[in-house]
Image: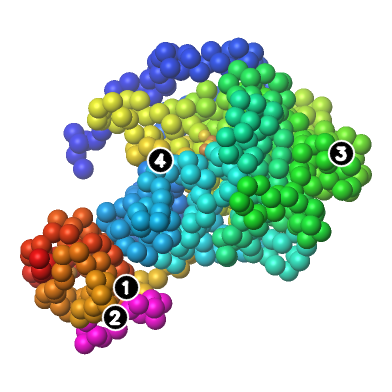
Amino acid sequence: MSSDNTPKIDTPPDLERRKFLNTAAAVGVAGTFLSAGLVGCKKEGASTASDASAHGAAGGAHEVAPGTLDSYYGLWSGGHTGDVRVLGLPSGREIHRIPVFNPDALVGWGITNESKAIMGTKADGSLKYHVADTHHVHGSYKDGTYDGKYAWVNDKINCRIARMRLDTFECDKITEIPNIQGFHGIFPDKRDPVDQSINYTTRVFCGAEFAAPLPNDGHDMENPEKYHALFSCVDAETMEVRWQVEIHGNCDLTASSYDGKLAATNQYNTEGGIKYVDMMSAEKDACLFFNIARIEQAVKDGKFKHYGDSKVPVVDGTPDANKDPKTALTAYVPVPKNPHGVNASPDGKYFICAGKLSPTGTIIDLSLVLKWFDGELKNINEVVVAEVELGLGPLHTAFDGRGNAYTTLFLDSQVVKWNLEDAIKFYKGDKNAKYVVDRIDVQYQPGHLNASMSETMQADGKWLAVGCKFSKDRFLPVGPLHPENEQLIDISGDKMVLASEHPVRPEPHDFIIVKRDLLKPRQVYNLDEFPNAVKDPKDAGVFRNGNKVTVKITSMAPAFSLSDFKVKVGDEVTIILTNLDKVEDLTHGFAIEKYNINFIVNPQETKSVTFKAEKPGVYWCYCSHFCHALHLEMRSRMFVEA
Ligand code: RUQ
Ligand code: CUA
Ligand code: CA
């Protein structure tokens, strides 16, 4: 490439960054933090900030040449587009989008009967929900690392959790969780708390951010004291809600321990506030721990209630009911003001809470939490082994497997790299322990970050992706809506080095970075997986039962097995289409003119659609997915007789 084509950065990134921080919006946010008494905090034990431009590029290690494959899968939550995106890393190339909660015209998600059954419908067959807000994606575990079986994602708007199969990268189940609002954090468990030989995921923990009256039937609407929030457990296989815990305060993010014994959620609204000023009135909030074995024993012992029509057992996890550590189901660990993010270190020892309105990171020792539950600690505060200053607006933390943590600083627009054991030493009084290892500026206002394999015991410390909530002037302007900026940082050395960045459509929130050999995607379906498969072109035809008509069709490039089919106005028509092509990547589409129908069938897959034949006439059905030199000729006709 000639140097003329090389993109230039006109203004040094650091200057741009400072300018941005001076805009009104940022001042507004900073103002909030000012009133929280945070600006001007001294970063003790801190080394000087090193900005990205000073490092130069990471020697092109992130570049993946044409024709070569990435070494990691990135599973990216899509935010309020309701989907999950699959990226290749380190290139940052978007490979795929998995439609989950929202309809998708390419695959026919929300159009086919099979996808509608997963998404949920009203009595008239229309979709129950059309909007969603995905935040957190996490994969299933075996032996402390990803087993490549499933990933889950939450929907904050309609309180649903979805599961995706990682062999086909498709959503296969969605569950709506009862009794909650503002469903935010999720995390799969990694082992069974009682039967430790079950070393894989069997539960997914779910936190609800908003408290509401229970049951929410029009009573107690004006009385926030009657509002409750619940922490839920969903069965990883059946996707049914196993149990819920009524708590004090709220849930935000969720973490699970490697031994399966503990789950936790950070709480920023222990005040039970309705307005933001009320939510930030207390100096401390909490990291709330759940003793999973005890909760499940309480459910077995019948110590639960139900709310509304829900059959899900709800146990009492409020502080008043859990005063004695030896029987407590929950432990409320005080942590500084409005924490955000709780993350498990890959050595299995610690959970880290980031302070958000406090410039601190808190390290909680899980072995001490278990000791507290055994009644061996005098005070719950003893489980905190460090509370150290990191910078302004700490949110989320990732790990490199070498003892270092990486925390986003939303207000400082930085990532801080800090050493956990040194932080613990510093907190214990060793003021020479220099726990801050490095800082790097990112553009701008980072929320989530994650490192390669960071959420597993195999954290490999190679790449760190940072989701910057604002891209400001980093990309060509495209009108009022700006993309976000995903920056990729090489963390293999002592210093963090900015390697690349790419824009992403808002707004992705969280993501995980998985070694590619842990996933084993399939290329072709098996006809036997579909009970309604049309296995032979000879089985194709129109089958009438009163005004219900089933049209069975097969596809094999470049033809559909029926070149036409007849139905009558007023019929309820179900089209079942099986793609008999066995060749990898030979996908066909099926679109019906004027009938608002389009979907695809992958090799050896079967899908169906049901609709009312309302308009008489001839309607071309055509293959909408490029498949063959005669793709344009691949058609059928639907005759709708008056
Ligand atoms: S949250 S920016 Cu929905 Cu994951 Cu922290
Ligand atoms: Cu079949 Cu295009
Ligand atoms: Ca608070």
Within 10 Å of disc 2 (Cα), the crowding (few <14, some 14-19, many 20+) is many
Amino acid residing under circle 1: Thr
The quadrant of the image that shows the N terminus is top left
Instruction: Give the mark, 3 or 1, whose residue is nearer the N terminus.
Output: 3
Q: Which residue is mark 3?
A: 323
The residue lying at 38 percent from left, 76 percent from top is 530
- Is the CB atom of the residue marked by disc 1 within 8 angstroms of ligand 2's nearest atom? no
Up-down relation of residue 294 to residue 425 (above or below): below
Mark-to-mark CA distance, 4 and 3: 40 Å
The quadrant of the image that shows the C terminus is bottom left
Q: Which residue is mark 1?
A: 606
The residue lying at 68 percent from left, 32 percent from top is 226
The picture places residue 567, in percent across and down from the top left corner, at: 16, 71
Q: Nearer the viewer, residue 623 or 220?
A: 220
Q: Which residue is mark 4?
A: 80
Q: Which mark is residue 534?
A: 2
Q: Quadrant of residue 457?
A: bottom right
- Is the CB atom of the residue marked by disc 2 within 8 angstroms of ligand 2's nearest atom? no
Verify whether residue 56 appears in magenta.
no
The picture places residue 324, in percent across and down from the top left corner, at: 89, 42
